[in-house]
């Protein structure tokens, strides 16, 4: 298929349609309304349905019901709405149902603001709800990557029978970029028939019960370890990261994800032109986190700079990756303020001049 | 599973699952379960084309006792789960069940909106006027003044009549049964399932453990069958039979016909798909999954 100029939110919606998503349940919240709106137009055209629920609690539990039928299903929301969906996320993980959840993160806490933020990193990567579970989290930095990751998200959700989150921000949603959808896309995982689903059947097999309740502690412990084995398999097989300008030697390694990494790449281009040796590693999966790739890349540098739109969330994973092996510096803007390339340039120059304090987390 | 395919009719016992109910002896929910088995048998419902969904509560254990597909879902969310299933698979018979706390307190908002949409599912609310599973706290249907574990000085709140709520928010079939009258409840469940659109059945179902043995007797005294000549298609008339002090009317209170949410979605789909040649998402999915 030819490239087409698309808004991020439309590309996300279209990617889902192309991946066979048949049902979408949502509730309006800025800045992601364009996704459900697009789905309300698009899904009926391909034999699907869009439902605007009475709340995110309702939408995510509708998703739970629909996922149980084995259909490919999706919702999207933004931070406060995602909090309301944390209930269903936990049940979905417990009942092992595949869904795709898009979070177009806005600044918080509370109602906060509607501008981009990465303040939901902990929420996304540390389970998103009660109980001991994980979401697989994908963070695109461009519209094309958002579309690709949404399609992959459906395969990963089906393969692991686990919710998958695509974490973006208002920039990804609003950006217009050329996007290409392959016309004969194949799933990225080998998918099994959904024998567990409530599909209706002519009595040729026992009916299924979908459940997340295990009152017998021994049984629940077994279930918990079974889930853990899936998270381990994700950690073994699904880690993705990309590096930028890392073929040449570098003194400073930037770690950033999502649209912030885009900003950093602009800064790196400029710095490189001036002869400053700087590179970037960009996590694409936030869970599982590319600890090893970051460690390996960092060991080639003399110091590391984490750039993110929060007061310090992903930096904790970078610290886990480095275990003190290199000094870590931090630059961030929050509240919906954006990091600019100039700020990054200034910070890198400051680090190289020995003027930037190492971040210490006590 | 002893139910067989073909012309053989299902006996009520054929719908039993292998789980034994863990309800307290004498719990009203047994009557509802028996009525459901009988109604399903009467309608010759195929268990493999049926999904029963619930929230959390004593009553919400019911799906486990029927050999259909089942969901023991999230507290208060039976109807949202049912929406998901029914929108995904309109061809299935979808029944939601649960308690008064589940359906009217934490899930109250969903009742309003599922009724308003006229989703084609049946909702059986097992009303014991108390929170059973959590051991006896006040519920939205507990009569004013009643002492419960969480209303030491008596319930300061007025009770809601679930039937009145359902009628006023758009349910197109509304009835009230009593678990002590299995014959009546069977008929009501069968009627409710046969209805196209949102059918809401409030079954008074005593909790012997937290409302005492008296509840059964007290309910029996205030129950009255709706008059033979009641015009059930008249909303105003129907409202006359919502909970009055001293009387609780059983039977079909309200019934009107019209397109369900699913009918409307289907119509919209047909309209949107007209003249297009791209593959449907079902067709896309079929290329991914060997057997789905
Ligand atoms: C979010 C959440 N809050 C509270 C509970 C605890 N809880 C379980 S069932 C229930 C209410 C039970 O009453 P009802 O719905 O009337 O059903 P019954 O047990 O009487 O059949 C409550 C409060 C829960 N499971 N989840
Ligand atoms: S506590 Fe009440 S509602 Fe629960 S099983 Fe016992 S009698 Fe039934």
Image (cartoon, rainbow, N blue to C red):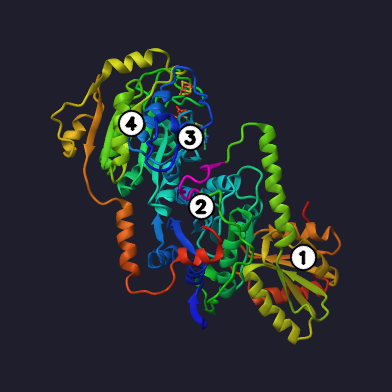
- Which residue is labeled 1 in the image? A329
Q: Does residue B69 appear to the left or right of A319 in the view shown?
A: left
Which numbered disc covers residue B2?
3
Which numbered disc covers residue B202?
4
Image quadrant where residue B79 sits: top left
Q: Check disc 1 and report its element: helix, strand or loop.
A: strand
Where in the figure is residue A355, as x and y percent of width and height?
80, 70
Circles 3 and 2: CB distance less than 8 Å? no
Where in the figure is residue B207, as x and y percent of width and height?
43, 20
Circles 3 and 1: CB distance less than 8 Å? no
- Which residue is labeled 2 in the image? A67
| Main SS class of the magenta portion in the image | loop
| Segment tinted magenta in the rendering | A198-211
Q: CA distance from mark 4 to mark 3?
A: 30 Å
| Mark 3 or mark 1, whichever is nearer to me | 3
Q: Note whether B111 is above or below B227 in the view shown.
A: below
Q: CA distance from mark 4 to mark 1?
A: 62 Å
Both labels 4 and 3 in a single chain: yes
Where in the figure is residue A257, as x and y percent of width and height?
66, 67
Q: Does residue B24 belong to the magenta stretch?
A: no
- Whether residue A299 is visible, yes or no, is yes
Q: CA distance from mark 1 to mark 2?
A: 43 Å
Circles 1 and 2: CB distance less than 8 Å? no
Residue at image point 70% right, 33% down: A218
Which numbered disc covers residue B28?
none
| Mark 1 or mark 2, whichever is nearer to me | 2
Q: Does residue A208 belong to the magenta stretch?
A: yes
Q: Residues within 10 Å of mark 2 (few under 14, many from 20)?
A: many
Nearer to us in this view, A337 or A282: A282
């Amino acid at each position: 298929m030819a490239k087409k100029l698309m808004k991020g939110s439309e590309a996300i919606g279209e990617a889902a349609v192309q991946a066979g998503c048949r049902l979408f349940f949502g509730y309006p919240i800025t800045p992601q309304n364009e996704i459900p709106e697009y789905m309300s137009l698009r899904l009926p055209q391909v034999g699907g349905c869009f439902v605007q629920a009475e709340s995110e609690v309702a939408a995510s539990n509708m998703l739970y019901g629909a996922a149980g039928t084995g259909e490919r299903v999706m919702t999207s929301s933004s931070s406060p709405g995602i909090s309301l969906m944390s209930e269903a996320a936990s049940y979905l993980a417990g009942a092992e149902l595949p869904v795709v959840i898009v979070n177009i993160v806005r600044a918080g806490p509370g109602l906060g603001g509607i501008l981009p933020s990465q303040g939901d990193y902990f929420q996304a990567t540390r389970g998103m709800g009660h109980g001991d579970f994980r979401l697989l989290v994908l963070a695109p930095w461009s519209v094309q990557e958002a579309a690709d990751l949404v399609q992959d998200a459906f395969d990963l959700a089906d393969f692991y029978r686990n919710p998958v989150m695509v974490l973006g921000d208002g920039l990804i949603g609003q950006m217009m970029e050329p996007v290409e959808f392959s016309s004969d896309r194949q799933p990225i995982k080998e998918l099994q028939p959904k024998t567990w689903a409530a599909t209706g059947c002519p009595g040729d097999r026992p009916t299924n019960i979908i459940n997340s309740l295990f009152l017998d502690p021994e049984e629940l412990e077994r279930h918990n370890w079974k889930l853990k084995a899936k998270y381990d398999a994700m950690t073994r097989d699904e880690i993705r990261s990309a590096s930028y300008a890392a073929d040449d030697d570098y003194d400073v390694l930037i770690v950033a994800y999502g649209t912030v990494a885009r900003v950093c790449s602009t800064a790196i281009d400029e710095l490189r032109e001036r002869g400053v040796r700087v590179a970037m590693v960009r996590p694409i999966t936030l869970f599982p986190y590319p600890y090893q790739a970051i460690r390996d890349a960092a060991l080639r540098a003399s110091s590391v700079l984490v750039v993110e739109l929060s007061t310090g969330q992903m930096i904790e994973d970078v610290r886990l990756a480095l275990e003190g092996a290199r000094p870590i510096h931090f630059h961030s803007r929050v509240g919906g303020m954006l990091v600019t390339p100039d700020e990054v340039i200034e910070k890198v120059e400051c680090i190289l001049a020995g003027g930037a304090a190492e971040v210490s987390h006590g | 599973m002893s139910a067989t395919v073909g012309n053989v009719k299902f006996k009520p016992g054929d719908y039993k699952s292998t789980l034994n109910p863990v309800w307290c002896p004498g719990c009203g929910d047994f009557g509802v379960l028996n009525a459901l088995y009988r109604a399903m048998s009467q309608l010759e419902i195929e268990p493999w084309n049926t999904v029963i969904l619930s929230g959390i509560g004593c009553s919400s254990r019911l799906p486990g006792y029927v050999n259909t597909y089942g969901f023991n879902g999230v507290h208060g969310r039976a109807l949202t789960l049912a929406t998901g299933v029914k929108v995904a698979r309109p061809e299935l018979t979808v029944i939601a069940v649960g308690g008064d706390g589940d359906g009217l307190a934490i899930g109250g908002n969903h009742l309003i909106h599922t009724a308003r949409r006229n989703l084609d599912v049946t909702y059986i609310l097992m009303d014991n006027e108390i929170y059973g599973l959590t051991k006896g706290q006040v519920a939205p249907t507990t009569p004013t003044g009643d002492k419960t574990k969480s209303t030491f000085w008596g319930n300061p709140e007025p009770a809601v009549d679930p039937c009145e709520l359902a009628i006023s928010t758009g349910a197109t079939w509304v009835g009230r049964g009593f678990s002590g009258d299995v014959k009546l409840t069977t008929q009501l469940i069968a009627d409710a399932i046969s209805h196209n659109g949102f059918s809401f059945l409030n079954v008074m179902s005593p909790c012997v453990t937290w409302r005492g043995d008296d509840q059964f007797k007290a309910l029996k005294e205030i129950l009255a069958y709706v008059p033979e000549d009641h015009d059930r298609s008249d909303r105003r008339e129907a409202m006359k039979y919502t909970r009055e002090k001293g009387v609780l009317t059983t039977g079909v209170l309200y019934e009107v016909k019209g397109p369900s949410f699913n009918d409307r979605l289907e119509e919209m789909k047909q309209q949107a798909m007209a003249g297009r040649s791209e593959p449907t998402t079902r067709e896309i999915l079929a290329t991914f999954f060997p057997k789905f």
